[in-house]
Amino acid sequence: GAGVSQSPSNKVTEKGKDVELRCDPISGHTALYWYRQRLGQGLEFLIYFQGNSAPDKSGLPSDRFSAERTGESVSTLTIQRTQQEDSAVYLCASSFGPGFTDTQYFGPGTRLTVL
Amino acid sequence: GENVEQHPSTLSVQEGDSAVIKCTYSDSASNYFPWYKQELGKRPQLIIDIRSNVGEKKDQRIAVTLNKTAKHFSLHITETQPEDSAVYFCAASIHYKLSFGAGTTVTVRA
C-alpha cells in the first residue's frame, strides 16, 4: 500500500517568509509525528498527534513553529518568519497508535533551505 | 527527557566482516528500541527493533542485543555487503516518543 508522503520534496525560501509543509500518513494510522533532521545529525522530535487528543508539542523549538492535523488525516507543519537555522530536512512519520506496535514509518522528507 | 548516545560516529569495515554499533540510553522506563537505516537522500527505514522484555533478536544478518541493567543496546551486522553502507540510527522510546542517537555512518569497503 501507499507509504507516508510529504510535499513539497524541496523548498527554498527567503529569510522571513512563512512556509507550510504537508504530510499524508499511511491510511489507518492514528498517530503522526514530525521530526527535524539537520545536516549530518540525528532526528529531533518536534510534535506528536494521536487521534483527537491534544498534541504533544514539547519538541517545537520556538513559537514560530506550529502544526495542525485534521482528525486522522493530513498534517501541516508551518514555520513563520523563517530563519537560516531552520534549514533542515523535515520528516513526518506515522504509526498505528496506542495498543499496537510502536513502529513508525517515515516519509521521504521535505528539504527546507532558508536563504 | 531521554538521552541516547551512539558510538562510533563512523565505521569502516571490509566486505564480509562484522559491524557493531552501540547505544546507551538514560531513562530506565524506555521499553522499545528500534534501529533505522538511512541511505543518502532517502527516508529512514526500520531494519530491526527490540522490546524491553527480550534480550536479543535476530533477522538474517542483523541482530540486536539489549542489556536493560546497563541501559545499552547494540546492532550487529554480519557478513557485511556494499549495500549495507548507510547511516544507522538507534532510538529509544517511552510510549510514543522516539529519542534518536546521532547516527553512525557505515562504509563497507569492497
Image (spheres, grey):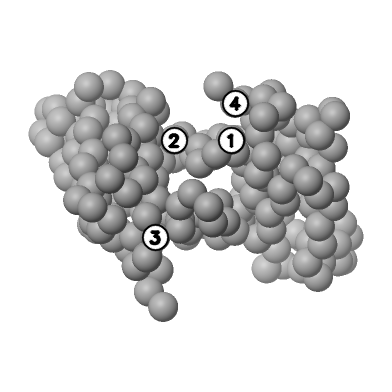
Task: Reply above or below: B110 against A83.
Answer: below
Tell me the element at label 4.
loop
First along the sequence among labels 4 and 1: 4
Residue B108: % across, % down? 75, 59
Residue A1: % across, % down? 41, 78
Inspect the image, locate mark 1, and give the three-letter code of the amino acid beneath it: Ile
Neighbour class for label 3 at 10 Å: few (<14), some, many (≥20)?
A: some
Tell me the element at label 2.
strand
Q: Nearer the viewer, residue B15 or B58?
A: B58
Residue assigned mark 4 = B2
Inspect the image, locate mark 4, and give the three-letter code of the amino acid beneath it: Glu
Give how far apart the Cα atoms at labels 4 and 2 are: 11 Å
For residue A68, which quarter of the picture?
Answer: top left
Disc 2 and disc 1 in contact, CB within 8 angstroms: no
Disc assigned to residue A45 = 2
- Which residue is at 44% across, 35% downward? A45
Q: Are marks 1 and 3 on the same chain?
A: no
Q: Residue furthest left?
A: A17
Neighbour class for label 1 at 10 Å: few (<14), some, many (≥20)?
A: some
Neighbour class for label 4 at 10 Å: few (<14), some, many (≥20)?
A: some
Residue assigned mark 1 = B94
